Image (cartoon, rainbow, N blue to C red):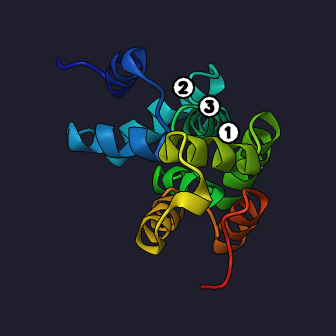
Amino acid sequence: MGKSSFESALRLLAKRDYSQEEMRRKLAAQGFSPEEIEIALGILGAKNLLDDFRYAQRLAIFLAREKFLGPRRISRRIFQKGIPADLVQAAMAIAEGTFPAYERLQKLMEMKLKGKLLEEMTLREKKKLVDTLRWKGFSWEEIQEALQASGGLKEE
């Protein structure tokens, strides 16, 4: 007799956290039936070993603190893990409280500028900076505000 879906799930959780949807996909890929998977997920949930909100919260804080991602990018990454939208929003609120987007944006700009002043940058360099900040998940409004606060946004 092979290993159970629960044992398989525990082995996976020993390496890292998973959302319920990710765990469902992993177990399905290992050939477990939908019934076996749902039983395993139920047991894991009851034992508080699989918690989508806790997972979303940890991921949001990690992406904010370590990757300096903006709200849009963090939300999208968490949502892609199969986390329901209401839990994504709640996790985002907690991440925002621990390291606000404006502070992340300032830190990211500081890192990208490497001591250079915005006034010293060419239009092309500023565009590259803005593109990077947009790619990281910050809105144009957030970027515009940060650039103005740094004295580097003038109509050109």
Q: CA distance from mark 1 to mark 3?
A: 9 Å
Q: CA distance from mark 3 to mark 2?
A: 18 Å
The quadrant in which the C terminus is found is bottom right
What label does residue 44 carry, if any?
Answer: 2
Q: CA distance from mark 2 to mark 1?
A: 14 Å
Q: Is residue 129 above or below residue 6?
A: below
The quadrant in which the N terminus is found is top left
Residue 98 vs residue 114, the one in the foreground: 114
**Quick one: SS at disc 3?**
helix
Residue at 50 percent across and 34 percent down: it is 41
**Quick one: SS at disc 2?**
helix
Residue at 66 percent across and 65 percent down: it is 152
Q: Position of residue 36 (x, y in %)?
A: 37, 36
Residue 137 visible somewhere in the drawing: no
Residue at 24 percent across and 18 percent down: it is 3
Q: Are marks 3 and 2 in contact (CB under 8 Å)?
A: no
What's the residue type where badge 2 is placed? Leu
What label does residue 58 carry, if any?
Answer: 3
Instruction: Give the farthest residue toward the right.
Output: 97
What's the residue type where badge 3 is placed? Arg
Q: Which residue is mark 1?
A: 53
Which-is-in-front pick, marks 2 and 1?
1
Q: Earlier in the sequence, mark 3 or mark 2?
A: 2
**Could you say which quadrant of the image residue 2 lies in?**
top left
Q: Is residue 132 above or below residue 68?
A: below
Residue 119 vs residue 139, the one in the foreground: 119
